[in-house]
Image (cartoon, rainbow, N blue to C red):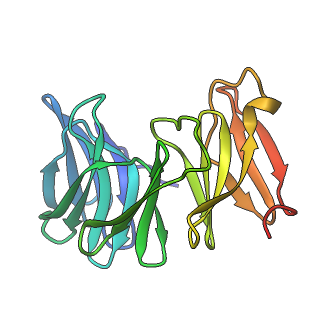
Amino acid sequence: YEISIIDGYSNRYFDSEYIILERRESEQQILECRTGIPSETVIWTLPNGCGTVGFYYRLENTLILNMRKEWGKETYLICIDLETGKILWEIDHCFQHYHLYKDKLVGCHDTELHFIDPKLGVKTSSHIIESYKHAFMMSPRSDITGDRFYVSTNEAVLCIDLTSLKCLYILNILSQNPNASFIDRPCYHNGKIFINVGHEMSMNIFDVSDLDI
């Protein structure tokens, strides 16, 4: 096999048409869009503050991603035209993790649930999850299956019904792992929730088939 090395770059997004790389220049990060690797054909570049955070979603000929303008500051979503690199819209005070649900992006932070129209670049609605009063992590990690939204907090995993916007049940992770310092993203599969707990990453498997009705 062959190996190609591009020094100073990190891979951020790729599909069959575009590859988005990130490099550091002076005091800021730069996004660079190419048509292939190791092709030197650069379509556009875009300064992006302190860098991307980790969410990327392609919608037709646009790419939606979140960035952070300054370290320690809230993230914001932007939508980029993949052909030109032009920013089509930007939303401040957004979360780090989103999922596509029907025709909307859904994300959760603190006790608030956001729905965003990815074509228009507007928050269509916000909802407070009243049934859970504990503080969420700064960037809760989540999974979505059908109409069920699974989100991890600093103490538990919640299952939220996206049609009724109610919390259906709560799995108290700390009761099983009292010394856990970290709760990773929950992954739902066939009636079970898989989640890594603690920085040593011990996997917990919860059978929720009797709860997921």
Q: Is residue 201 above or below residue 42?
A: above
Say whether residue 25 is visible: yes
124 horizontally vs 50: left or right: right
Q: Quadrant of residue 123?
A: bottom left
Q: Which residue is rendered at x = 79% and y = 41% of the image?
A: 204
Q: Nearer the viewer, residue 175 or 16?
A: 175
What residue is rendered at 12% in x and 68% in y? 84
Nearer to the camera, 93 or 34: 93
Q: Is residue 164 rendered to the left or right of residue 193?
A: left
Tell me if 197 is positioned left or right of 14 in this view.
right
Relative to 168, say whether 11 is above or below.
Answer: above
How many numbered tags mark residues here?
A: 0
Image location of residue 181, percent across then percent down: 64, 24
Q: Position of residue 208 (x, y in %)?
A: 82, 57
User: Which quadrant of the figure contains the C terminus?
Assistant: bottom right
Q: Is residue 39 above or below residue 136?
A: below
Out of 138 and 67, give the one closest to the viewer: 138
Residue farthest to the top, as pictured: 179
Percent position of residue 162, x then y: 56, 68
Q: Residue at 15% x, 28% y: name it.
A: 27
**Left or right of 111 in this view: 50:** left
The percent coordinates of residue 90 (x first, y second) are: 19, 58
Is residue 98 in view from this perspective? no
Vertical position of residue 26 compared to residue 153: above or below: above
